[in-house]
Image: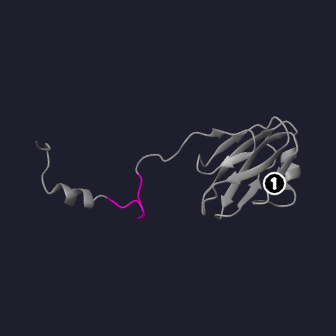
Amino acid sequence: QYINSVTSNVQTQIDAKPDLSDDQTWTGSQRSPLLTDNDGSFDLNARNNFFCTPAGNITLTFTNHTSGQSGYILFVNSGHTISLAATTKADANLTATLSTAGTYLVSYFDNGTNAYLTTSAVFV
């Protein structure tokens, strides 16, 4: 038994492959589609970017906090009350803004313990 096209020691070739813990240069696109999550609980292990249309009052919650992760939520609300979990941080006006009917782009940055949010004004 043999492996076709082997030109040197196989283990040496395997060992020469890049270590993904090192900085990488990507030549292809690195993206994933939006994940729809309408209950306001965003799993940071699932994706970076989300789409949310709440059907009722919700509490914005992030699970699986990952230091340095960031992303967006395209948030379309028909006027339901929005609140924040204890580990979801935002300025004093964010919940009032998002509780007003409209479409918003919410950005988040996670420090491994808390998710910090900012939001756009309503899109027209």
Q: Nearer the viewer, residue 25 or 12?
A: 12
Question: Does 84 sit left or right of 51 as displayed?
Answer: right
**Which residue is found at the position 81% from the left and 34% from the top?**
55
Q: Position of residue 87 (x, y in %)?
A: 75, 60
Q: Is residue 66 above or below residue 81?
A: below
Q: Main secondary structure of the magenta part?
A: loop
Does residue 68 appear to the left or right of 58 in the view shown? left
Q: Is residue 63 above or below residue 19?
A: above
| Residue 18 point in image, percent of width and height | 33, 60
Quarter of the view holding residue 86: bottom right
Residue shown at 20% from the left, 58% from the top: 11
Q: Residues within 10 Å of mark 1 (few under 14, many from 20)?
A: some
Question: Residue placed farthest to the left in the image?
Answer: 1
Does the segment drawn in magenta span residue 25?
Answer: yes
Residue at position x 73%, y 60% from top? 116
Colouring mode (rainbow / by chain / secondary structure / one colour): one colour
Q: Which residue: 29% across, 58% down?
A: 17
Q: How far from the left and from the top, in percent, is residue 36?
A: 67, 37
- The kind of secondary structure element at disc 1 is strand
Three-letter amino acid code of the residue under disc 1: Leu
Q: Is-magenta flag for residue 64?
A: no
| Span colored in magenta | 18-26
The quadrant of the picture occupied by the C terminus is top right
* Residue named by callout 1: 84
Quick one: 25 or 51, which is closer to the camera? 51
Marks counted in the figure total 1
Taking the view exactly as shown, the residue that stands out farthest to the front is 1
Q: Quadrant of the N terminus?
A: top left
Q: Where does the image place residue 43, in percent across and percent down from the top left?
A: 65, 48
